[in-house]
Image (cartoon, rainbow, N blue to C red):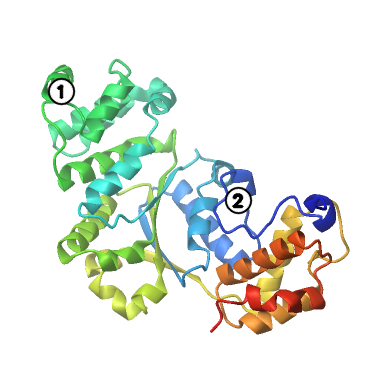
């Protein structure tokens, strides 16, 4: 078989359908307006002490999850932080849990990603200031003791992680009594309080982290929760925004086809949360010009060598035909078709991909069209 890079002048298939495991392969192409909205919103949170809720709205496959992953990349956040002249944000992406205990699941998703050793190293020179600050937030002595223990290097980092997970037995718990931790974490109020306190500490004076960015993906899954858990999820969002009054940027990714329209949102997202939404970022279906610009940039990012045709290995008339055949569809559907067209051409050693090649595979690559 011919060498893919040499034949198609591409480092790899740019239209991969599974998320890139290598952050370097996670790129942004086209859609400058959407990218700029995220950059401005993140930069504002880096600069200004203010907590914000943003709703990202679009059809399935329109790029919301990709945006969360791209803007969770360390180098992307570092560049925005440097532009603002502040510390990097602390960013994490989770999916809305569908189970019986959504707040516990959100809490665990965030604790899973918490590197306590790294955190202690980062804050070692200001741990005294952070402890004083912890005394000033809230009146719950137990929560304050847990927060101090997270930053206290005298306590084994695995012990505190075990405690946060709720995996300590009574004997092990006694070893934390001297640090003021006398009981286990037990309910949603505890979990929300720990997360709110942790986020506030991470962004103390914007010294080590300028803000916390939390992306909740697949938020439309709130529609499958029972009423009690819809209540809990709304209460959690309201409380976390109120209790981290500074430096929290919360993005909710919502697929509109699941909830049909903004009007239907009220039954799942309560007024107390909706009133806190500062901005809606819309992921619209791409028109032909937008899609072709995206395609030129994407292929350029994966280009191996040079070519006069910015769409190579595809001929432009193939792209035009595909747009007509697919009609008004999501970016994901375009990517699926191009990925399959590229893979089939590679298997049969056909290059460049012209109208004849396109027509021979047309039934296979637009199978999803009714």
Q: Is label 2 in a helix, a strand or a loop?
A: loop
Using the image, determine if residue 332 lies above or below residue 199. below
Q: Quadrant of residue 306?
A: bottom right
Disc 2 crowd rating (10 Å Cα; few below 14, some 14-19, many 20+) is some
Judge from the rendering whether residue 66 lies leftward or rightward of residue 120; answer left or right: right
Q: Quadrant of residue 53?
A: bottom left
Judge from the rendering whether residue 135 lies leftward or rightward of residue 256; answer left or right: left
- Residue that badge 1 annotates: 173
Residue 26: numbered disc:
2
Residue at horizontal 30 percent and vertical 54 percent from the top:
97
Disc 1 crowd rating (10 Å Cα; few below 14, some 14-19, many 20+) is some
Q: Point out residue 358 in the picture as x, y percentages from the top left corner.
A: 75, 75
Residue 305 seen anywhere in this rendered image of the structure: yes
Q: CA distance from mark 2 to mark 1?
A: 43 Å
Q: Is label 1 in a helix, a strand or a loop?
A: helix
Q: Residue furthest right?
A: 308
Judge from the rendering whether residue 233 lies leftward or rightward of residue 297; answer left or right: left
Judge from the rendering whether residue 175 lies leftward or rightward of residue 255; answer left or right: left
Q: Nearer the viewer, residue 266 or 318?
A: 318
Q: Point out residue 147 in the picture as x, y percentages from the top left corner.
A: 25, 31
Residue at horizontal 19 percent and vertical 60 percent from the top:
229
Residue 311: numbered disc:
none
Q: Point out residue 327 in the picture as x, y percentages from the top left corner.
A: 61, 83
Residue at horizontal 75 percent and vertical 64 percent from the top:
345
Residue at horizontal 30 percent and vertical 78 percent from the top:
264
């Amino acid at each position: 078989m011919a060498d893919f890079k040499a034949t198609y002048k591409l480092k790899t298939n740019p239209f991969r359908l599974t998320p890139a495991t290598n952050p370097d392969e996670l790129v942004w192409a086209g859609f400058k307006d959407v990218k700029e909205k995220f950059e401005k919103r993140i930069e504002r949170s880096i600069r200004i002490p203010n907590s914000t809720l943003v709703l990202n709205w679009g059809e399935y496959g329109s790029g919301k999850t990709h945006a969360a992953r791209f803007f969770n990349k360390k180098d992307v956040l570092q560049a925005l932080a440097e532009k603002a002249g502040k510390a990097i944000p602390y960013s994490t992406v989770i999916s809305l849990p569908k189970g019986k205990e959504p707040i516990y699941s959100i809490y665990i998703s965030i604790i899973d990603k918490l590197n306590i050793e790294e955190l202690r190293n980062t804050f070692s020179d200001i741990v005294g200031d952070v402890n004083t600050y912890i005394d000033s937030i809230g009146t719950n002595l137990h929560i304050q003791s847990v927060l101090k223990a997270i930053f206290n290097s005298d306590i084994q980092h695995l012990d505190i992680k075990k405690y946060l997970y709720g995996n300590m037995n009574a004997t092990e718990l006694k070893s934390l009594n001297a640090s003021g931790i006398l009981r286990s974490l037990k309910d949603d109020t505890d979990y929300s309080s720990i997360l709110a306190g942790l986020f506030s500490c991470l962004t103390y004076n914007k010294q080590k982290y300028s803000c916390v960015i939390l992306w909740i993906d697949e938020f439309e899954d709130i529609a499958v929760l029972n009423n009690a858990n819809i209540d809990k999820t709304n209460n959690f969002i309201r409380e976390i925004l109120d209790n981290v009054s500074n430096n929290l940027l919360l993005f909710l990714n919502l697929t509109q086809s699941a909830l049909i329209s903004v009007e239907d949102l009220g039954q799942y997202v309560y007024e107390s949360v909706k009133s806190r939404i500062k901005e809606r970022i819309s992921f619209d279906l791409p028109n032909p010009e937008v899609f072709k610009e995206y395609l030129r940039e994407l292929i350029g990012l994966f280009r191996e060598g040079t070519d006069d045709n910015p769409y190579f290995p595809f001929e432009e008339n193939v792209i035009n035909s595909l747009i007509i055949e697919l009609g008004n569809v999501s970016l994901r559907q375009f990517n699926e078709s191009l990925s399959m067209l590229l893979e089939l051409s590679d298997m049969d050693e056909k290059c460049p991909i012209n109208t004849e090649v396109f027509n021979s595979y047309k039934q296979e690559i637009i199978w999803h069209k009714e």
